[in-house]
Amino acid sequence: MKSTWGISLLKRVAYLSAVLLGISMVTFGLFALAPGDPAEIILRDRQEAPSAESIAHLRDELGLNDPLPLRYLGWLAKALRGDLGRSWQTGEPVVGQLLDRLGATLELAFCTLVFVVLLSTAMGIMGAVFKDRPTDRLLRALSILSLSLPNFWLGLLLIMLFALHWTWLPLMGRGGPANLLMPVVTLGLAIAAMQGRVLRASLLEAISQDYVRFAYAKGLNSWAVLRSHLMRNALPPVLTMWGISLGHLLGGAVIVETIFSWPGLGKLAVDAVLARDIPLVQGAVLFMALVFVLANQLTDLLQRCLDPRLRRGLDADSGDHFG
Amino acid sequence: MAKAGSCILALLLLIGLAAPWLAPHDPLRTYLAHRLEPPSLAYPLGTDHLGRCELSRLMFGTRISLWVGLAASLLSLAMGLLAGVASGLGKWWLEAPLRGVLDIALAFPGLLLALVLVGAMGPSALSLVLGIAGSVWPWWGRLVRGLVMSAKQSEFVMGGRVVGVEGLRLVRHYILPQVLPPLLVAISLKTAWVILATAGLGYLGLGVQPPTPEWGAMLQESRMYLTRAPWLMLAPGAAVTAAVLGFNLLAEGMRDMLQVKQIRGW
């Protein structure tokens, strides 16, 4: 028994390494193949007139004249030692910049997750308890609306109302708990709406099971049934969603961080892409993908521990793409 | 609900198609004497920071959003269908590498891959379509693969096999009918997401470049004038919401009508 565990764990680690290798290739290849000469871009950034000579010199200095596979291997070898090169804009090491931004992204991600868990649980339970009654219909309409609200618009609306009109909340940036409020709601509302729906469906599916009727027949009241029978069975799919959304949130909320000038990884990636700061883009993308894959793997392991029946196959509803 | 959704979408399609005739002004004509004017009879939604008619820009913006949305959605569906069917039905030597490619492509969270793809190709309508399709297709691949695998194991398909149906005929007459309803729901949901992504990238400055009117870019421009001209921010956001809501409602209605259980959540 123990040895099969070991083997399956080994297999998983091997497969994961292969996936990570693929990720690194994609990450490196994306911008290496992009049009435009990086040397020229850097020179323009430094306000120098790019002459043929200075371009050739800089290309040589950056190693851009080597063939692509060689450049990739060099980059990978350094990346494995924790060196992702230096930003073309600032000249600072990329790893340092990523770690600087990690704190802000972690803060936003965990606070949003708490908000999502609380709101989606409340919505899911209310929806299931009041199934097809006005409360449920209202919740359903609200959740479809929340899913359709673009977060960049929601963010601007909140800014306009709470920061500019009433000036209750700080406009942007990171600071105290008040700074968190608008980004968390903007980021979490759609995710909470979606997960509330999943929890509702999951609860309703559980309600129709025989063990629930048996629990009622035993004379348990609704609350006891909900707590000790329903939630336990409805929880695994919802837990998976929480895990995956944490991965997404950690991967950087690209748009929301930009709206609120939140100094996290997502904003770093956007700024780097816009400035065509290729080492920084590569570093940020690699880092976020790594965090995302690891979060998903942890969720998967957790789910296996919680749900021994674990069905394989159809996992399309595990809800990716939060944007 | 499907009705409400299709009404919204039909209306948007109509506005997009008839924009040259419906729009009260030229969406590109700047008129600095009339900058940041509040809504009036001449300019029903006011004017922007260059004195351009907001309503006309909004109407022409419908074209980009719907065009990019549908094109990226269908392109990614085609790619994902190919990959999904091949890895769901193919031989092991096809299945394993395809699964690997899907897993690699699925490892980039949210908008990240689209952001980088569009950034690498340089902002334009075409790179929006390609970049978004390039980041969405693995999602389709995995969905289709799962649907095909579970259809393959259904008694219905086994029955077909027993009587000797094989290959393309099996796919067309036995597997496709089971896979189609969830796919239709997913297409509508994913198009909603793609429209959000298009406007989102436009907001980040990676969409169609100015002066072409695009909803996301219009929102980005309105940011500077949130207190002076709030109407500039309300209209494009409401337009994106309407388009996304249309597809979400359509999906919701189809889900109920076709009794699709596989695709929950979104």
Image: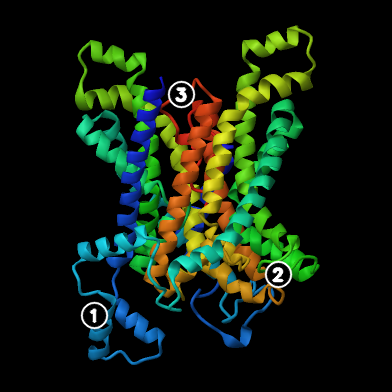
- Name the residue carrying label 2: A171
Disc 2 to disc 3, C-alpha distance? 46 Å
Q: Is residue A150 left or right of residue A21?
A: right
- Kindly identify which chain the residue marked by label 2 belongs to: A
Disc 2 to disc 1, C-alpha distance? 45 Å
Residue A203 percent coordinates (x, y): 64, 25
Instruction: Mark 3: give few (<14), some (14-19) or many (20+) Cα within 10 Å.
Output: few
Amino acid marked by disc 2? Leu
Q: Is residue A159 left or right of residue B170?
A: right
- Is residue B138 shown above or below B29? above
- Kindly identify which chain the residue marked by label 1 belongs to: A
Between A205 and B248, the one lying in front of the other is A205
**Residue at point 63% right, 76% down?**
B224
- Is residue A26 shown above or below B24? above
Which of labels 2 and 3 is toward the front? 3
- Name the residue carrying label 3: A311
The numbered mark, 2 or 3, whose residue comes first in the sequence reads 2
**Residue at point 44% right, 62% down?**
A284
Residue A239 percent coordinates (x, y): 58, 34
Residue A14 percent coordinates (x, y): 32, 40
The numbered mark, 3 or 1, whose residue comes first in the sequence reads 1
Residue B187 in view: yes
* Tag 3–tag 1 contact (CB < 8 Å): no
The numbered mark, 2 or 1, whose residue comes first in the sequence reads 1
Disc 3 to disc 1, C-alpha distance? 54 Å
Residue A256 percent coordinates (x, y): 59, 60
* Disc on res. A60: 1
**Residue at point 36% right, 60% down?**
A81
Amino acid marked by disc 3? Arg
Q: Secondary structure at mark 2?
A: loop
